[in-house]
Amino acid sequence: MIIKKLIGQVTPEEKNEIQTLFERRNGLNELAKILTADNAELYEKLVKDLGETGAKFQGWWDHMAEKYQWEGTANGNWEINFDTCEIYLVTNE
Amino acid sequence: MQKRLFYKNPPLLLLFIKMMEKLPIKSSDNVWKAGNAKEITFIVTKDCQLACKYCYLVGKNTKERMSWDVAKKTIDYILDKEEEFREESVVWDFIGGEPFLEIELIDKICDYIKIEMFRKNHHWFNSYRFSFATNGINYHDVKVQNFIKKNRSHLSIGITIDGTELLHDMNRIYKNSCKGSYKDVVKNIPLWLSQFPEGATKVTIASDNIPYITESVLHLYSLGIHDVNINCVFENVWKEGDDILLENELIKLADEIIEHKLYEENNCSFFWEELGKPMDRVKDNMNWCGAGKMLSIDAAGNFYPCTRFAQYSLREKKAWIIGNIHDGIDKNKTRPFLTLDRCTQSNAECIDCEVASGCAWCQGENYDAADTPTAYQRATAICKMHKARVRANNYYWNKLYRKLELEGIAKEEAEKHVKMSNHEIC
Amino acid sequence: MLQYLIIQLDDTSTSYCHYENGKMERRLMALEDLKAGILFAMKENLMIQFVYPDYVLPQEYKDAINSIDHNDIVSSSCEDMSLREKADVVVFNSWASVEQNGFQDATVCVLRTTKADLLDKYLLLKPVLSTVTRLNVVITDVDTFTGQDFEDYKKVLASLSEEVEKLYIESKSPQLNQLTDRMLLDKMNNCNAGWENITLAPDGKFYVCPAFYLAGDDEDFGLGKAKYSIGDLQNGLDVKNPQLYKLEFAPLCRKCDAYQCKRCVWLNRKTTYEVNTPSHEQCVVAHLERNASRDLLNNIRKHGTFFPQREEIKEITYLDPFDIKEQ
């Protein structure tokens, strides 16, 4: 059973940051499905970007969790509602 | 979340925004990046399996299929002009005819767009969608499904289904056999909804199908389509008495929705709280339509302010071309659209109309129906149908709110509201 | 409200504005149409402006024309010398015609010029400013202006402005449409064809302006024929979408303060497809003139009181009102 618990809220500016990273990460993942190592230059750029974006993405959550002192659990993850800027703790019990 | 307002007393509005957020009524979903996204439409083909009786595309044909060369030149032109396309986001839209007839071309286009946006470090790489309105007939096709898997997180796909088999097959018929297409569409709805649970459909109402609206909307809800966008055609097709028929039919629909609490999970665009209010000449003077802000490209590589200005959409007028892939956009040709406002194109009756809000128009139909080649003459064929809709809409919200109030759902909020209201007056 | 009737007497009548008249074959308006046009103007209380061909009109035409108060617009190459001498407006269709005939003193002169010729020969205008009653410079290819042309035109205006300023200091009152009109206006003073004036053509039909008659039968601006009539003498006026010729129905222009702009509906139709929407080029040219007028007014006022009742022309940061339109 999935349980969603409201644990906090970020500012619209903070939401925009993570939304942009989220969109970029999705874009890179879908690009990875069609780019091959044959296109060496672009492939290298993609791999580098995936790493950087992933790091920024995780960095945002780490930074916000510390800033707002969000509750967390070992078997759960955080989710953001882009419409409301609300943060949820989602656990699978 | 879209705020729902239905109280007529202006000072109370702000309070009711809060109040309605707590009411058990489903709101319609926001359009992705509404107002901040550039919409670029590829008319990939003018062919379609169907020959829907109400289709505004009068010039469909099998010959005008977009070539890869035209598509590539279009993308190169647009992505090379990043300084001129400053919108935060982009919707790459594919239209026909039936767009999925050209799934191989579309797949190639989308791959190229993704690669080029990334290669050029284009700001749209961080915010784009691929959008489709399809008749759903070949939705299950393996090529379409592979495309969906490949681009899942950037897709918006709407399947058009008009309602019950009877209604759907009255209009949406195959072009060669005149056979209805309902069965071939409905079998794909579960697959579509499993991939796009928030999928919405668009229903078009013409004179002959007014009596079937209620059962059709309810049928769509029962299929699991919770957002039904429905509108009367803008063309001058309405017969004497159609407005009364529509009003009665919508009241019947309102009763069904309210009685069975369908408002909790479903949305029907015919009922909208902000419908039917007077509009201020200054504050509410925006144009309804986005023609000119959008960009459409056809197989010949011509640019249009929207698809409705391409020749295959026009009955009476010549295509309104604003440029092409070789010479680019002639910005002078887009100026009339980008300076259009509500009052300048409306007659005095429309400007002073007491139920003006929500009365839509199609810029292309305005142009096609105008006395001169202008986008500045608003067509009013829909007037009596809008007024009928307003009456039924008023009925719906008055009845729904009263019901909720009697059920006690809104009671506390209403009491707070009265207190606050008095406080404000003091 | 309709105030003027322009009567294009012949297919070869001179152009006096942005449009070209390429017609070489004479087609004189039927005498009965001329008389009917004059009667129409009398009944509608319209001032008539006759636009003449270069050849001498038959006497019965002159008699009809003289039956009503009117203005005469003739070309500098008109063969009817007496008409040319007493004409209200004399049009020079090229710099060659200026060299050939010279500007006529104490007359309103119109110089129709290409931008290239104007940028090249504008210095020749300086001596003329003190002799003619008024000089209207009409650029015939406004729609071809590009970025560098705008810069060059700005310099031309600044140079002509120095001459006008000098003449004002000498207590003369030169009139050059590009520079002096805006100084003396406090509201729009556009051409207003189709709204305040219409044209009767040799075919007995009404047109928005002569340009809409002179366009070729097959000429197409993109959305349909460039040539269309707005009624005829038998059935009267029938203007479709008449509101679109009015200032209040021109979203860009109704808030604009380049009051001297012609707001040419024919150029609008040609460049943007809509009679109520000006092109970028027309707007920028008009604003360069507006800004040059502003500088001129400020410079003249440095020498003493000058039209104190007129407000200062404000400094603005744009050249095309489209760039600051409300979103």
Image (cartoon, coloured by chain):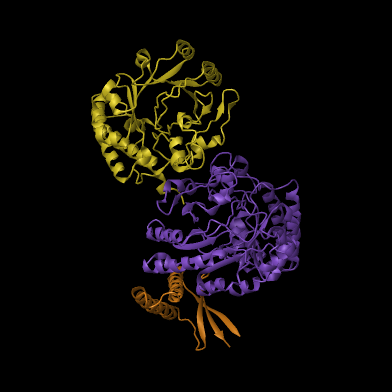
Measuring from the top left, give residue B235's x and y in whole percent: 64, 48
B310 lies left or right of B353: left
Q: Which residue is painted at 41% across and 79% down in the image?
A: A54
The location of residue B1, given as percent across then percent down, is 57, 66
Let me know if residue B97 appears in the view. Answer: yes
Of residue B398 and residue B169, the one placed in the foreground of this image is B169
Where residue A33 appears, as percent x and y from the top left, is 45, 76
Determine whether, in the image, residue C168 is placed left or right of residue A27: left
Q: Colour of chain B?
A: purple
Q: Chain A is drawn in which colour?
A: orange
How many badges with numbers are in the image? 0
Q: Residue C135 occupies which quadrant of the picture?
A: top left
Which quarter of the picture shows residue B275? bottom right
* Left or right of B426 on screen, residue B186: right
Q: x, y percentage for residue B133?
A: 58, 63
**Picture layout, residue C245 above or below residue B237:** above
Chain C representation colour: yellow
Image point (29%, 34%), residue name: C118
Image height check: is C63 above or below C45? above
Of residues C60 and C110, the one nearer the viewer is C60
Quadrant of the image for the C terminus of chain B? bottom right
Q: Which residue is drawn at 31% across and 36% down?
A: C115
Q: Can residue B30 be seen in this view?
A: no
